[in-house]
Image: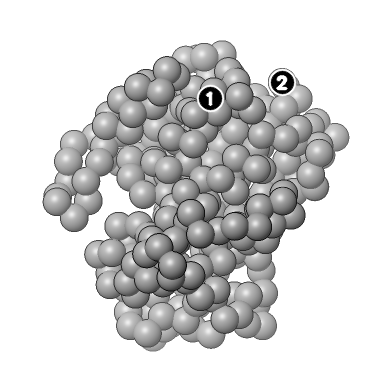
Amino acid sequence: MSLADRVVFITGASRGIGRAVALACAREGANVVIAAKSDTEQSPKLPGTIHSVAAEVEALGRKALPIRLDVRDADACEAAAKQAIDWMGRVDVLVNNAGALWWADVVDTPVKKFDLIMGINVRASFVLAHALLPHMIQRRWGHVVMMSPPVYADEVSGHAAYSVSKFGMTLIAKGIAEECAEHNVTGHALWPATAIESYATINFGLGGPEVWRKADILADATLELISKEPSARKGQAWIDEDLLRSAGVTDFSKYQCVPGSEPPRFPYKGLPRATKTVV
């Protein structure tokens, strides 16, 4: 198993992409920190909790640490990082998956909403990286993965606040890769080539299953990044399909939500332009 006895800390891990990454890591031998706000069932539209995912990880024969965490709380993030390190004596990988959607124009974005998405997306990713990097540097092994896109500012067409928050995550990943290279610690950004099936796409009506891929493609791409030595691949911003193709994957049909229906790639390199406001 490529992650035998590694410890992976995942935010937003109670459902969707975070859950898929957690289970993929467990199948490869990792023990997993399940960090998210949901410690009880929220609603039928948002099933899953940190405890349900922890049980799934344990059913795969690995250990799980569920932590209720509001990533906007810097003190709570610091405490969660310490709790995770104390739990197994190590944290090898941080996956900053928790995120907030706000696809709207600048004039339709209240300042409080701007602050919210900045707090959940870019600030929380920075705070958790800041908390865990000294430990990774001391151990001379670590990956920090941001679920964020390559920075192509010229191709952004709308929802500027969301774009800034996601591009900020990518810039932090690039900074970590440069600043920590001598310590065998790196940062990566990872983004899907297509829309991904998740409760966000389902609940906000962002297309249908025929244009979605399963979250497993992001989970497999994450494994491709974190199962290697940090020094083996220079940290950069990746598109999931391109990364997996570089690793030899040629058949992507298993990721189709509708068998035989291949989802279209986003038509340009930047974030997709929303056809309606998503909150």
Give the structural element (helix, strand or loop) at label 1: loop
Which of 56/37 is in front?
Answer: 56
Q: Position of residue 209 (x, y in %)?
A: 34, 67
Q: Position of residue 109 (x, y in %)?
A: 37, 77
Mark 2, residues whose alpha carbon is within 10 Å: few (<14), some, or many (≥20)?
some
User: Is tag 2's residue or tag 1's residue first in the polypeptide sequence?
Assistant: 1
Q: Quadrant of residue 256?
A: bottom left
Which of 96/25 is in front?
Answer: 25
Query: Tag 1: residue type?
Result: Ala
Q: Residue at x 27, y 32 (%)?
A: 52
Query: Tag 2: residue type?
Result: Arg
> Quadrant location of the C terminus?
bottom left
- The residue carrying mark 1 is 30
Q: Residue at x 67, y 49 (%)?
A: 188
Mark 1, residues whose alpha carbon is within 10 Å: few (<14), some, or many (≥20)?
many
Q: Position of residue 141 (x, y in %)?
A: 72, 27
Count of marks overlaid on the render: 2
